[in-house]
Amino acid sequence: MKKKIIYFILICFFFTISLLISTPYRNYIYTNKIEDFGLADVGNNIFAVTVISLISWIGAFKFSNNKIIDILIFTAIYIVLEILSYFFSIFGTFDYKDIIALLCGSFLAIVLLYLFEKENFHNNIKGLNK
């Protein structure tokens, strides 16, 4: 139960940072023509995989019994949507930086899994070898 509360706090934290990057920060950067190396454009994607992974760890849903596989599935889904945005504008605008940001978010989710669930992390790694 304690872990679920920590995960919920992390969800709120990362979601809030994502919103701050995507709205006020992005508007400020564009208005003042400041070079931020694309952070304003990829702000949502940095934390997308992390937030959805934390939501699944609370128990809302999961694709498998292995949390690392779930992280990889979430990352793959977001990358497929990003690639589809190259062909269909309803998904947004394609940018390779978004894919890099999604991979960084996936790495962040794996680091969080290691920090909060070391034993489960090692069991998940062993489960990948089967």
Image (cartoon, grey):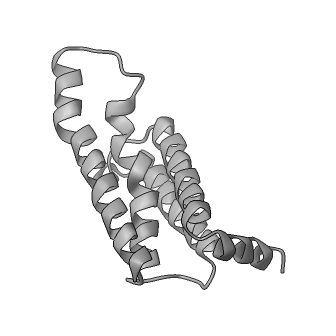
Report the front residue among 45 and 119.
119
Residue at the far right: name it: 130
Residue 10 in the image: x percent, y percent? 36, 60
Residue 104 position within the rendered picture, expressed as x and y whole percent measured from the top left:
54, 46
Rendered position, 17 above or below 126: above
How many numbered marks have been drawn onto this rendered protein structure? Answer: 0
Q: Please report the residue visible at 33 percent of the width from the left and 69 percent of the height from the top.
A: 8
Location of the C terminus by quadrant is: bottom right
Q: Where, by quadrant of the figure, is residue 28 drawn? A: top left
- The residue that appears at 51% across and 66% down in the rendered structure is 74
Residue visible at 65% across and 68% down? 118
112 relative position to 33: left or right: right
Left or right: residue 125 compared with residue 100: right
Q: Is residue 70 above or below residue 51?
A: below
Q: Position of residue 85 (x, y in %)?
A: 40, 50
Q: Where is the N terminus found, in terms of image quarters?
A: bottom left
Does 38 appear above or below 66?
above
Q: x%, y% of residue 7?
A: 39, 68
Left or right: 68 in relation to 54? right
* Residue drawn at (68%, 75%) of the image: 119
Quarter-of-image position of residue 27: top left
Q: On the image, which quarter does residue 64 sit in?
A: bottom right
Q: Residue furthest front?
A: 2
